[in-house]
Image (cartoon, rainbow, N blue to C red):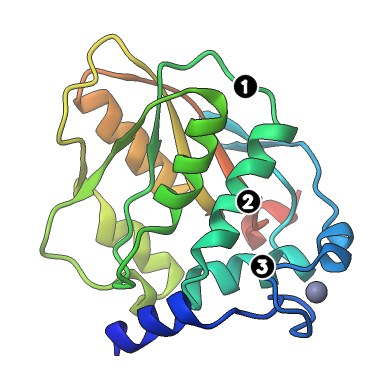
Amino acid sequence: MPLATDLSNLFLPSNCAVCGRLPKPLCDVCFDTLRFESKQVNRGELSGQSLGEYRDQLATVINSFKERGQRNLGVLLGNELAKRLTRPDAHLLVAAPSATARGFVPAEIVAGALGKAWAMPVARLRIRPGGQDQSQLHRSDRLVNLVNRIWSPIPLSGKKVLLVDDVVTTGATLTEMARAVVVAGGEPIGFITVAETIPKSLTKF
Ligand SMILES: [Zn+2]
């Protein structure tokens, strides 16, 4: 299955993720309907920025990128982050590792484009084997599944580190990434995500 999917992505032009009409990953008309913001987001002790809420066309674009493997959409989103958000004073970016088998790591594509635009190197984080595929788990079980499993294969001593993920919901993944950065000797200074989902526990306030 993955081979066939990869080949079709290589050789067939994919139509616009939003309208499905024009042979571009995201047509100009639909691009203009994406209302990107520069949004301040806070989760626990971490603060960060994103391009907007995870809904409407932005959710459609993110889903096409992640679930249909349209990597060029991830690059496009990374470039928009670089253009619209404030570049923090960080030494490097780390991308959220993926516990979902897809053949690629979405946050690494976004972080790659962002790092290129901001001239910031990107380091990879890893997940120790032994857990379950995140996509098969209920949201409340995902943090439990990741706790103490994310790690940095390289030392990050003395580095100010910016965390990157595609979508932040509860902040559980970012919190676990921050822990891994600290264990490797680095200092997590905040995060960047393409979009924010507002969890029910936060909408009460
Ligand atoms: Zn379109």
Q: x, y (%) of residue 50? A: 67, 42
Badge 2: how crowded within 10 Å, few (<14), some, or many (20+)? many
Q: Are the residues flagged by discs 3 and 1 in contact, CB closer than 8 Å? A: no
Residue 11 relative to residue 118: left or right: left
Q: Is residue 136 above or below residue 4?
A: above
Q: Quadrant of residue 88?
A: top right
Q: Kindly state the secondary structure of the residue where label 2 is placed.
A: helix
Q: Which residue is mark 2?
A: 77
Q: Is residue 22 visible?
A: yes
Q: Is residue 123 above or below residue 135?
A: above
Q: Along the polypeptide, which appears first: circle 3 or circle 1?
A: 3
Q: x, y (%) of residue 124? A: 28, 40
Q: Is mark 3 within 8 Å of ligand 1?
A: no
Q: x, y (%) of residue 166? A: 53, 53
Q: Along the polypeptide, which appears first: circle 1 or circle 2?
A: 2
Q: Are the residues flagged by discs 1 and 2 in contact, CB closer than 8 Å? A: no
Q: Amino acid at mark 3?
A: Val
Q: Which residue is mark 3?
A: 61
Q: Amino acid at mark 1?
A: Arg
